Image: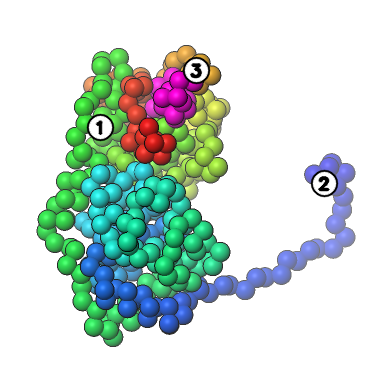
């Protein structure tokens, strides 16, 4: 505001009118009945929860609904953790889905999407769902329904209110529990998580495979954590391998897919949840954009582990454009030594090229993980994340 406006006197106090509290949108009874009718004919139902389900506090009731109908569970990336610990949860739907999860999602003959936009990332450009599957989209905003994906039945309402209404209706309906939930499926889900998917470790002594890095960190870090990711090629590794205790434990910084927002967002998460260790997963390009915030972390005495997946490049652009033969000079840059930069502002730091180098993090966690620590992980640049290959067809 102009200085003269800031200095101007206000003749009378302005009182803003109080806004009435809005009640959650309740579904129409006829729509609920239609979903129950669909459940009668479904043998492989899937409940997919998105940000709307998290905001509605629908996690517990959706799990009860899944138990009642024998459904498997999945989330969008932003709702990661909503069903943490549930043995029937497939994890994140879309590019971050494990091969087993993707196969089971494709087998679903009825998808109940609660508060999920069904965008191209969640549906793998519309190819993840079976084309014969019936899609029901639940959202409190009518304009959000059918915006990104085919929808067979639209149900306007708050995610929790709809789930409660469905449970009430099912108590008075003779709808059998599907037979999809059987021991073989449960074991496939357990064994088929990303931690169980074999891969050829590309670590070579000077660089560490980002999958190996992520799996090892997951074992070291306390369960009570908040994982915050910046945008970039690396972001799939923490999303796939770093487990979170609940939906509050995962912050997916993908606004406009802009690189460089991760560290500032992680600072906000650490301030909001000081009882948990905040893990900021950054690429080296994004870390350089937010470099000044390292001082903020130490000044505020935040408990934070900053992990830089350092491949000396904007990795997403490298892996996207390399197959086309386009020159990559603009998206590659000299390796940056982040550890001395972190130490300069009073932070612990370690350079990681081998698994053994992560012992410094293990010792820090064992001592209570006080203050902040930065991990400059020199990751193997030739490893291409599965989600990126799927997203761009390489």
Alpha-carbon span between mark 1 and mark 2:
53 Å
| Badge 2 or badge 3: first in the primary sequence | 2
Magenta highlight range: 306-327
Q: Is residue 155 above or below residue 371?
A: below
Horizontally, is 167 left or right of 229 in the view? left
Q: Position of residue 1 (x, y in %)?
A: 80, 44
| Badge 1 or badge 2: first in the primary sequence | 2
Q: Position of residue 219 (x, y in %)?
A: 24, 37
Q: Are marks 2 and 3 in contact (CB under 8 Å)?
A: no
Could you tell me which quadrant the C terminus lies in? top left
Q: Position of residue 89 (x, y in %)?
A: 26, 55
As helix, strand or loop, the secondary structure at mark 2 comes to helix
Tell me the mark number nearer the camera, choosing from 1 and 3.
Answer: 3
Identified at 85% across, 57% down, the residue is 10
Horizontally, is 246 left or right of 178 in the view? right
Residue 384 quadrant? top left
Identified at 48% across, 48% down, the residue is 272
């Amino acid at each position: 505001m102009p200085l003269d406006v800031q200095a101007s006197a206000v003749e009378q106090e302005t009182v803003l009118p109080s806004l009435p509290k809005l009640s959650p949108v309740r579904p129409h009874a006829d729509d609920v009945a239609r979903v129950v009718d669909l459940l009668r004919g479904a043998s492989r139902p899937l409940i997919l929860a998105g940000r709307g389900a998290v905001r509605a506090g629908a996690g517990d009731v959706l799990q009860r609904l899944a138990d009642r109908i024998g459904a498997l569970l999945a989330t969008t990336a932003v709702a990661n953790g909503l069903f943490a610990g549930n043995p029937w949860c497939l994890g994140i739907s879309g590019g971050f889905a494990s091969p087993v999860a993707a196969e089971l999602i494709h087998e679903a003959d009825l998808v109940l999407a609660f508060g999920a936009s069904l965008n191209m990332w969640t549906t793998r450009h519309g190819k993840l769902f079976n084309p014969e599957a019936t899609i029901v989209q639940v959202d409190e905003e009518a304009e959000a329904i059918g915006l990104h994906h085919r929808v067979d039945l639209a149900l306007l309402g708050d995610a929790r209110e709809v789930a409660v209404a469905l449970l009430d209706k099912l108590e008075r309906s003779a709808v059998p529990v599907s037979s999809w939930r059987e021991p073989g499926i449960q074991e496939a889900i357990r064994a088929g998580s990303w931690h169980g998917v074999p891969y050829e470790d590309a670590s070579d002594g000077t660089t560490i495979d980002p999958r190996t890095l992520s799996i090892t960190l997951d074992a070291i870090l306390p369960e009570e954590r908040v994982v915050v990711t910046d945008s970039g090629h690396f972001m799939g590794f923490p999303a796939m391998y770093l487990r979170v205790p609940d939906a509050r434990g995962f912050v997916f910084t993908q606004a406009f897919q802009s690189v460089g927002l991760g560290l500032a967002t992680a600072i906000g998460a650490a301030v909001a949840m000081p009882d948990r260790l905040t893990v900021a997963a950054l690429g080296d390009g994004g870390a350089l954009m937010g470099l000044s915030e390292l001082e903020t972390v130490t000044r505020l005495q935040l408990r934070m582990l900053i992990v830089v997946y350092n491949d000396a490049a904007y990795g997403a652009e490298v892996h996207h454009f390399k197959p086309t033969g386009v020159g990559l000079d603009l998206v590659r840059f000299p390796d940056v030594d982040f550890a001395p930069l972190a130490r300069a502002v009073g932070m612990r730091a370690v350079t990681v090229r081998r698994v053994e180098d992560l012992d410094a993090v293990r010792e820090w966690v064992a001592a209570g993980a006080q203050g902040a620590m930065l991990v400059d992980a020199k990751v193997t640049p030739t490893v291409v994340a599965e989600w990126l290959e799927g997203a761009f067809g390489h």
